[in-house]
């Protein structure tokens, strides 16, 4: 380990590779920008038929290729470039000359092309040529500060040379090495892409390429800004640089994948750190892909299309899941309108036969007196509308009292209390519901101006309840109690609630009653009956 002003510097091969990658990023960035914009200008010139410009642009492309190769040789094996017996100062001078030669050619041709194109209305070409010259100027500065400023063997490192040490050390600390461990699918999908890179020329070049592909692009210069943008904006893909000051790309990636809101956004890491460990760790952390700089634009486009294709398929899958969830919810709601919740649960748990005996339950029958002749006079849609209005109000009242609607038959309506789950006060609940039902029909009768009244009958006693049918299920109730309640309704009076003596005694003195008299019930003999008038004040 070597101590520096920036902290402890590991002298491992991995650090050397990372340092070389950092220098490659810093020096290659303007070279890649020049080559990229020259390619874009070349494409535009061919499309516009600018033959004279094409020849100069091809010379610029050749010079930039030579420059890129020379820069890589300087980074990877500078000692091999030094001639035998060559003094260090002479070596520096030669390097500076060799690097400046293609740069001078690129700038010279760029200036000539600019002069030729001025006043022709080719504003985009002029802007791109200006970017080529800006990248060339940036590389000239980098040559002086990073390549031609090399030190003699035993000299201490200068401040600008130790600047990247902390950044690299921090990155390698979080991107742990691994032991041992694609295929792209091309598809043109126009999507919204976020480019995160601290080097302006990289952002500019990526943005131009993506815009040419028909994508919408946003660019940011650091990880913190990227996370802020993702709070309020939606993106289909993120292109993420790894080596950035402040919050490095690996930390940004981990934060993205730890959030339920952003974990499904595909991320392609693009980094000058061309090493196996970083690629594997980024993929493990959730990155869709890892591309080293400088990247091949065709390969990048293929990887982007593959990621967008996967996201499109996932979004479609999520949409289908949501549709299935809503459909299941609708089916559940419909089923609960047919069967009680507890019965549905039992059937889902595998109950082949659902049948129960209840020692004490209250049964209510209601009929709309006057509705049959009314139905013969009115159009069918009005008949259905009236019946739907009445029964919808009945349904809400049943739910409010915690009772169970059993079924409707024509204009008859049947309710049970104390099943499928026992209720200690089911008689009172049924009595209160009956009073509400009479009031509902009276209200609708007045508002619609129709001659209809409710006639209700109630009885309490033992019943058997269960599910019948294999396709069209129904939860029904059987027994003498049901038959008796039906007779109470049949022999009742319009606008009144006819109850059995058993029901009267179950309600006690909390309600007001009017004796109706004796009623003979087949199989039960003669029984006393009453009209329920209402709850007494204060009960």
Image: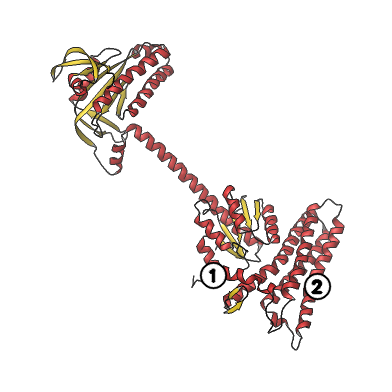
Q: Nearer the viewer, mark 2 or mark 1?
A: 1
- Which of the 4 quarters of the picture holds residue 331? top left
Q: CA distance from mark 2 to mark 1?
A: 40 Å
> Which labelled disc corresponds to residue 101?
2
Residue 18 picture location, percent across and down: 61, 72
Whether residue 93 sits left or right of residue 234 in the image: it is right
Name the quadrant of the C terminus: top left
**Residue at the spot 70% in from the left edge and 57% down from the top edge:** 204
- Which of the 4 quarters of the picture holds residue 360? top left
Say whether residue 410 is visible. Answer: no
Q: Are marks 2 and 1 in contact (CB under 8 Å)?
A: no
Q: Is residue 84 placed above or below 158 in the rendered structure? A: below
Say whether residue 444 is visible. Answer: yes
Residue 410 picture location, percent across and down: 33, 20
Sequence-wise first label, 2 or 1: 2
Whether residue 208 sits left or right of residue 407 in the image: it is right
**What SS does tag 1 mark?**
helix
Q: Is residue 424 placed above or below 491 in the rendered structure? A: below
**Residue at the spot 82% in from the left edge and 69% down from the top edge:** 104
Q: Out of 185 and 398, give the one closest to the viewer.
A: 398
Residue 498 picture location, percent across and down: 24, 16
- Which of the 4 quarters of the picture holds residue 491? top left
Q: Is residue 322 placed above or below 424 in the rendered structure? A: below
Few, some or many C-alpha atoms within 10 Å of disc 1 (few <14, some 14-19, many ≥20)? few
**What SS does tag 2 mark?**
helix
**Residue at the spot 60% in from the left edge and 64% down from the top edge:** 242
Few, some or many C-alpha atoms within 10 Å of disc 2 (few <14, some 14-19, many ≥20)? few
Circle 1 residue: 173
Name the quadrant of the N terminus: bottom right
């Amino acid at each position: 380990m070597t101590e520096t002003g920036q902290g402890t510097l590991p002298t491992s091969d991995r650090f050397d590779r990372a340092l070389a990658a950092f220098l490659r990023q810093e020096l290659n960035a303007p070279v890649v920008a020049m080559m990229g914009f020259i390619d874009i200008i070349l494409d535009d010139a061919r499309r516009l038929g600018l033959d004279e410009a094409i020849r100069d642009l091809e010379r610029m492309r050749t010079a930039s290729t030579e420059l890129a190769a020379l820069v890589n040789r300087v980074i990877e094996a500078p000692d091999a470039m030094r001639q035998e017996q060559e003094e260090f100062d002479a070596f520096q001078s030669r390097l500076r000359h060799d690097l400046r030669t293609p740069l001078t050619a690129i700038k010279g041709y760029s200036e000539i092309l600019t002069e030729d194109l001025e006043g022709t209305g080719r504003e985009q070409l002029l802007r791109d040529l200006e970017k080529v010259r800006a990248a060339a100027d940036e590389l000239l500065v980098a040559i002086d500060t990073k390549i031609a400023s090399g030190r003699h063997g035993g000299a201490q490192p200068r401040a600008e040379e130790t600047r990247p040490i902390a950044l690299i050390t921090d990155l390698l600390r979080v991107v742990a090495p691994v032991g041992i461990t694609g295929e792209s699918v091309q598809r043109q999908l126009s999507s919204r892409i976020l480019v995160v890179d601290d080097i302006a020329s990289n952002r500019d070049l990526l943005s131009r390429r993506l815009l040419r592909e028909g994508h919408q692009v946003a660019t940011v210069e650091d990880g913190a800004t990227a996370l802020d943008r993702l709070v309020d904006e939606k993106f289909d893909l993120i292109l993420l640089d790894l080596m950035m000051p402040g919050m490095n790309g690996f930390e940004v990636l981990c934060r993205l994948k730890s959030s339920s809101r952003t974990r499904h956004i595909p991320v392609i890491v693009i980094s000058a750190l061309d090493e196996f460990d970083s690629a594997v760790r980024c993929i493990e952390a959730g990155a869709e892909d890892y591309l080293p700089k400088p990247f091949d634009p065709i390969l990048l486009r293929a990887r982007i299309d593959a990621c967008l294709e996967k996201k499109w398929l996932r979004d479609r899958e999520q949409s289908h899941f949501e549709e299935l969830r809503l459909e299941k919810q609708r089916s559940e709601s419909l089923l609960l309108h047919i069967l009680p919740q507890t019965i549905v649960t039992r059937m889902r748990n595998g109950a082949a036969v659902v049948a129960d005996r209840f020692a004490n339950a209250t049964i209510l029958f209601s009929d709309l007196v006057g509705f049959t002749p009314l139905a013969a006079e009115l159009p069918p849609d009005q008949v259905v509308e009236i019946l739907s209005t009445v029964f919808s109000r009945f349904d809400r009242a049943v739910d409010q009292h915690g009772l169970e609607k059993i079924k409707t038959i024509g204009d008859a309506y049947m309710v049970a209390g104390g099943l499928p789950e026992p209720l200690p006060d089911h008689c009172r609940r049924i009595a209160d519901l009956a009073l509400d039902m009479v009031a509902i029909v009276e209200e609708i009768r007045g508002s619609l101006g129709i001659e209809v009244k409710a006639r209700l009958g109630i009885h309490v006693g033992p019943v058997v309840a269960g599910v019948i049918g294999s396709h069209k299920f129904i939860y029904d109730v059987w027994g003498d109690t049901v038959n008796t309640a039906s007779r109470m309704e049949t022999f009742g009076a319009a606008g009144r609630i006819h109850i059995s003596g058993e029901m009267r005694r179950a309600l006690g003195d909390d309600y007001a009653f009017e004796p109706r008299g004796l009623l003979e019930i087949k199989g039960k003999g003669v029984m006393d009956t009453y009209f329920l008038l209402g709850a007494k004040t204060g009960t």
